[in-house]
Amino acid sequence: MTYEAATFKGPSKPYLEIKDVPTPKPGGPGGEILVKVASTGICHSDIHLFKGDFGPVMPGFIPGHEISGWVEDFGPDVKNPWGGLRKGDPVIVSWIVPDGICKYCASGKENYCPAAAGRMPGLVGLNGGHAEYLTVPEIAVIAPLERGVDVYYASPIACAYGTAYHALREAGVGPGTSLVIIGVGGVGLSAVQLASAMGAYPIIAVDIRDYALDKARELGATHVINSSKEDPISRIKDILPDGADVVHEARPEPDLKLSMEVVSRLAR
Ligand SMILES: [Zn+2]
Ligand SMILES: [Zn+2]
């Protein structure tokens, strides 16, 4: 059996080509699950991947690390420890694939797990979700999705929302936290929406694109600043004379310059 996948062509444009590839069998060591892909996000990390910023990529590699879909099949070694996962369940796939047993995993910091560095679906070592199917280690499957979450819209949880949520949580964002978010692309807009749900106020979004700022306002930003048209430092100081409790920089090439100007002395 074969299926269609967007495969990496090589480090020159166009980067991807659609190919028929053999459907993988979930038989790898430690237990693998075959996932039928519902949707897969395109992330700025894909650009880094194509440019070789994460190391050389072999032609034929399948990118895509923001993945949602359904459980299609279980490999022979799958433990399914709570027994709750069934074929057809909607799931998301984590691109952090930890071993689940080391001291980092035990302390809830799976992103530091040494095993995770060498296997990231769609980024390093494992084919990703720009395809109809993929196999992933069992531990990468996060499931089942809450009722009411549309599986087709759930894939950004696996990267953009997860990244933003982790950053806001680590910074202690909660009710009344004053927050500046610099750059409202995928991660920045996710941060706006999550910060709004967490009760942060004010939420000041800074970008150079009016359409991105319009979206930020729609998702919960209380103030928006187009830094190509007005001075973001004086605008932010007007709103927050002592600076912001937290500044979240989500630009593709962060330099922290604006952040350092507008964060309070108790910077986070
Ligand atoms: Zn990503
Ligand atoms: Zn670990």
Image (cartoon, helix red, strand yellow):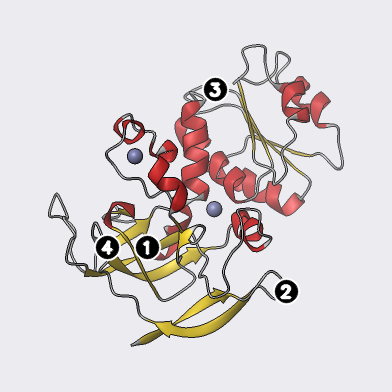
Residue found at x 44% / y 83%: 21
Per the image, label 4 sits on a secondary structure element best described as strand
Residue identifier under label 4: 32
| Mark 2–mark 1 CB contact (< 8 Å) | no
Disc on the earlier residue, 2 or 3: 2
Q: Which residue is mark 3?
A: 177
* Residue 128 percent coordinates (x, y): 46, 65
Does label 1 point to a residue whose CB lies under 8 Å from ligand 1? no
At horizontal 52% and vertical 66% (from top left) the residue drawn is 63
In space, the residues marked 2 and 3 are separated at their CA atoms by 44 Å
Cβ of mark 4 under 8 Å from ligand 2: the answer is no
Is residue 247 found left or right of 195 in the rendered image? right
Q: Which residue is mark 1?
A: 151
**Of labels 1 and 4, the one closer to you:** 4
The amino acid at mark 4 is Glu
Decide which of tag 1 and tag 3 comes sooner along the chain: 1
Q: Secondary structure at mark 1?
A: helix
